[in-house]
Image (cartoon, helix red, strand yellow):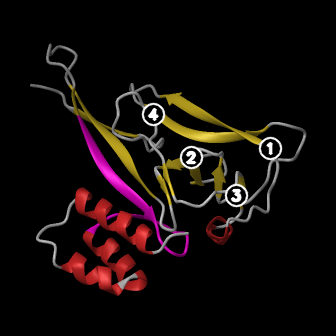
Amino acid sequence: MRNVQDILLVLIILISHNVSGQVESSLSSRQQKIGIYASYDEYVNNTTSKTVPFKIRQVTKNYEDGSMRFWFNYDVIDSSERPKNVYALFDGLYLYLAFNDTVFNVFQFAGRYPYTIRQTLHVEKSAKWDDTEDRTEIEDNIIYINGKGKSFSATAQSVGVLLLKSDKALLKEFEKEPKYNNAVFLRYLEELNKRHPL
């Protein structure tokens, strides 16, 4: 009898679909200021109250069960004190939103309603005496930021609420969709950002 253990590996790095792990970024048409943003309002208004120089670094942690986790953090590159209460970082290429003080997630689209794809790797371990290879499955979950700076997982209900509060005309189109999936959610998040640019 096979001893099956499900291991959930959350890739906090929020990577895109390419296998190299490179993050594809799409920014709004405006010139986003490089810097540290203390709040969502600062990000939207393109004003940085924290101006210390910083450098992004990727963090990788290996666990005893064979899983790995990836995320981003930053270092101040001079003698300045590390700022507190950081909401987001922009390094000229990518937008990083704070999960907490030491974990930052990179977002693939940096508009008024930033969004990204978080990939979760499910690993089904085979028994030690079984020659069968471990089976893996990657699950995509879209994360977006609403108009108040809060993060949500994209579902038919959550995206519907977002459109209800931000664009009722677009909501009417959304409600006519025959089915809802990640491709639909991405299409409407993209359209919402086009209609309401920064």
Q: How far from the left and from the top, in percent, is residue 124? A: 22, 32
Q: How far from the left and from the top, in percent, is residue 72? A: 58, 40
Task: Identify the residue position indicated by label 3 in the image.
Answer: 86
Closer to us: mark 3 or mark 4?
4
Is residue 140 positioned above or below 5 on the image?
A: below
Using the image, tell me which numbered label, if any, was put on residue 30: none
C-alpha distance separating marks 3 and 4: 24 Å
The local secondary structure at tag 4 comes to loop
C-alpha distance separating marks 3 and 2: 16 Å
C-alpha distance separating marks 1 and 3: 14 Å
Which image quarter is the N terminus in?
Answer: top left
The local secondary structure at tag 2 comes to loop
C-alpha distance separating marks 1 and 2: 16 Å
Which image quarter is the C terminus in?
Answer: bottom right
Is residue 104 positioned above or below 122 on the image?
A: below
The local secondary structure at tag 3 comes to loop
The local secondary structure at tag 1 comes to loop
Using the image, tell me which numbered label, if any, was put on residue 53: 1
Q: How far from the left and from the top, in percent, is residue 170? A: 31, 79
C-alpha distance separating marks 4 and 1: 24 Å
> Looking at the image, is mark 3 or mark 2 earlier in the sequence?
3
Task: Identify the residue position indicated by label 4 in the image.
Answer: 22
Residue in the picture at 36% in, 79% down: 163
What amino acid type should be assigned to the residue bearing mark 2?
Tyr
Q: Quadrant of residue 44?
A: bottom right
